[in-house]
């Protein structure tokens, strides 16, 4: 079944990780669901959702203790500099939440 | 051996319930630690030398914490005083501390850790071959131009100056810019606790009760370190520490949940285990891995210019559908009027894509939008000039078939252009090797009567 991450995640959030990067956390309800999502959420998928150059996705870290995935992306404008739109990076999660994945166990 | 560390709040000035402090003190902590700073609010505060938390809020928190520290005979340790932790921030903090100290039964003994970085010192350091690493590729190597062009620089100091300051028997340690964990880890490490565990406990405590359920930045936690494990416990009985709340915190505001880099090494968190015990969580498994070099991060900012902000609203559908063209024409007019440049314009359209910009997945604007125009120029007068030109162009722009010939936008405010002072950018965000952990920040005792 195709479902959006926002509809299956227990937590889906964004925040600064220093002034030059945004870190996005997705916490999934179960290990099975985490494994299904982790296999599909690649840097390319994230780059497409944000319309970013794939190089701007700095990495995806798995944190199975919490059934969590951490996605780090480079900021186009460092936090708090002229032209920034989100000083704390707290509203950058929405395109991630709209990514659709094929899951059976979420 | 057991060491107890009280963290009353996430940031000095964010407040805490008095009941929580009282309960925490009842558990007989050995030290009160509190972080007072962050770079999250942006480069402005380091550049201007001002705090991002109001003095009155800091003074209130400090009054109760200093009283608790003197009554219980335990040190109060503060890091990143004044927010950014540079000299003007620390001096401002010392003035607040001076006012608070007058209300105490005795004047506290104070040790100060200055973290300012002098440009000549840094340049000679680099020339003498100290290792330098950029933490942000976009900033490039640490050049003389970047150093000389910085309005102000600080070093984010490690735990070592705080350990040293505690040896002086100070009642209060006032730290300049430092790693967030410093005020919480210094005393346990000074008493011989395992460094990896002390730093991991400090990392959980430094955000107050954010690692509890429900979380809060305006409430506290207690950490108890004993042998090969530590326990974290919220001060407020309305909160609980749970495996999920504590583990979730290890994802918070960082890119790597497995490694916490600090001057001199990193904390390896890959084998951490959690266990719930009542309202507490017991944590084991963090390991300190020392590295060959002792590197500190230098933070520096440079002036970007002078800023004016204009806020306009639009409701007319025809205007909204043509907005990008109209903004483009307005900017073109500014370019003709100021052909030599020396200014930048940043426009956000709220109700369309102001927050996500090109990453916005929804294409269509709302029925009404807010247009926020930011102008940053090399002089205040140019910033005001460009903003007023853009404002007038937006209000009176015409197009074929326009029916709204009296005006296009609704300004909510008069004056409509708001002068916002100086704007800054990060100029230095590099690791620099120190020959000794106390090369910057060797603690000095503060003599009362010297208040800045």
Image (cartoon, coloured by chain):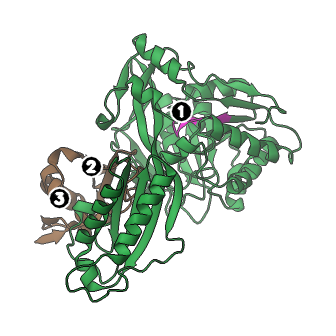
Q: Which residue is mark 2?
A: A73
Relative height, residue B448 to residue A43 (above, below): above
Q: What colour do you see for chain B?
A: green
Instruction: Determine the secondary structure under disc 3.
Output: helix
Image quadrant holding the C terminus of chain B, namely top right
Q: Is residue B434 visible?
A: no
Disc 1 to disc 3: CB gap under 8 Å: no
Q: Chain of mark 1?
A: B
Q: Is residue B179 covered in magenta?
A: yes
Judge if badges 1 and 2 mark residues of a common chain. Answer: no
Q: Which mark is residue B227?
A: 1
Q: Which residue is mark 3?
A: A37
The magenta-colored residue range is: B174-182
Q: Residue at x 34, y 82 (%)?
A: B368
Query: In this orientation, which residue lies closer to the viewer: B17 or B130?
Result: B130
Query: In this orientation, which residue lies closer to the viewer: A65 or A85?
Result: A85
Q: Percent position (x, y) of residue A50?
A: 20, 58
Neighbourhood count class around disc 1 (C-alpha, 10 Å): few under 14, some 14–19, many 20 upward: few
Q: Percent position (x, y) of residue A19?
A: 39, 45
Query: In this orientation, which residue lies closer to the viewer: B333 or B416?
Result: B333
> Residue B137 occupies which quadrant of the picture?
top left
Neighbourhood count class around disc 3 (C-alpha, 10 Å): few under 14, some 14–19, many 20 upward: many
Relative height, residue B250 to residue B350 (above, below): above
């Amino acid at each position: 079944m195709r479902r959006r991450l926002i509809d299956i995640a227990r937590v889906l959030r964004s925040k600064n990780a220093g002034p030059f990067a945004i870190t996005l956390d997705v916490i999934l309800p179960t290990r099975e669901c985490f494994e299904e999502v982790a296999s599909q959420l690649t840097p390319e998928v994230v780059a497409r959702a944000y319309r970013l150059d794939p190089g701007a996705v700095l990495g995806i870290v798995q944190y199975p203790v919490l059934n969590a995935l951490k996605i780090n992306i480079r900021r186009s404008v460092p936090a708090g500099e002229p032209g920034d739109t989100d000083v704390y990076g707290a509203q950058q999660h929405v395109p991630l939440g709209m990514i659709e994945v094929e899951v059976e166990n979420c | 051996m057991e060491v107890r560390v009280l963290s009353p709040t996430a940031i000095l000035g964010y407040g805490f319930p008095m009941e929580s402090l009282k309960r925490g003190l009842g558990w007989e902590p050995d030290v009160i630690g509190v972080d007072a700073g962050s770079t999250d609010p942006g480069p402005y505060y380091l550049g201007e030398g001002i705090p991002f938390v109001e003095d009155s809020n800091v003074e209130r928190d400090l009054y109760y914490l200093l009283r608790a520290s003197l009554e219980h005979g335990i040190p109060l340790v503060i890091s990143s005083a004044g927010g950014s932790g540079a000299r003007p921030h620390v001096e401002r903090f010392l003035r607040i501390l001076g006012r608070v100290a007058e209300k105490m039964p005795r004047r506290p003994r104070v040790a100060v850790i200055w973290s300012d970085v002098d440009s000549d010192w840094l340049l000679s350091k680099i020339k003498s071959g100290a290792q330098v690493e950029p933490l942000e590729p976009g900033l490039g190597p640490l050049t003389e131009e970047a150093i000389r062009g910085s309005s102000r620089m600080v070093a984010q100091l490690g735990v070592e100056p705080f350990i040293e300051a505690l040896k002086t028997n100070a009642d209060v340690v006032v730290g300049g810019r430092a790693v967030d964990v410093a005020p919480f880890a210094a005393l346990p490490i000074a008493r011989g606790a395992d460094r990896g565990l002390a730093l991991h406990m400090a990392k959980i405590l430094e955000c107050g009760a954010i690692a509890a359920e429900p979380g809060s930045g305006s409430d506290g936690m207690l950490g108890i370190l004993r042998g090969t494990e530590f326990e974290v416990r919220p001060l407020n009985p309305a909160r609980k520490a749970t495996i999920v709340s504590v583990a979730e915190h290890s994802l918070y505001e960082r890119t790597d949940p497995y490694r916490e880099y600090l001057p001199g090494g990193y904390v390896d968190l890959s084998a951490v285990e959690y266990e719930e015990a009542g309202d507490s969580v017991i944590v084991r498994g963090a390991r300190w891995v020392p590295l060959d070099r002792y590197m500190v991060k230098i933070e520096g900012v440079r002036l970007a210019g002078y800023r004016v902000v204009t806020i306009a609203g639009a409701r007319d559908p025809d205007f909204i559908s043509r907005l990008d063209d109209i903004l483009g024409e307005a900017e073109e007019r500014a370019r003709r009027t100021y052909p030599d440049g020396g200014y930048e314009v940043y426009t956000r359209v709220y109700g369309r894509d102001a927050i996500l910009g090109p990453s916005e997945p929804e294409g269509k604007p709302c029925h009404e939008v807010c247009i926020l125009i930011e102008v940053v120029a090399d002089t205040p007068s140019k910033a005001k000039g460009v903003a007023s030109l853009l404002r007038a162009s937006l209000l009176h722009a015409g197009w074929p078939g326009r029916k709204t010939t009296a005006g296009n936008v609704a300004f909510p405010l008069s004056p409509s252009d708001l002068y916002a002072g100086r704007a800054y950018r990060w100029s230095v965000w590099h690791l620099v090797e120190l020959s000794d952990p106390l090369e910057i920040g060797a603690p000095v005792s503060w003599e009362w009567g010297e208040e800045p």
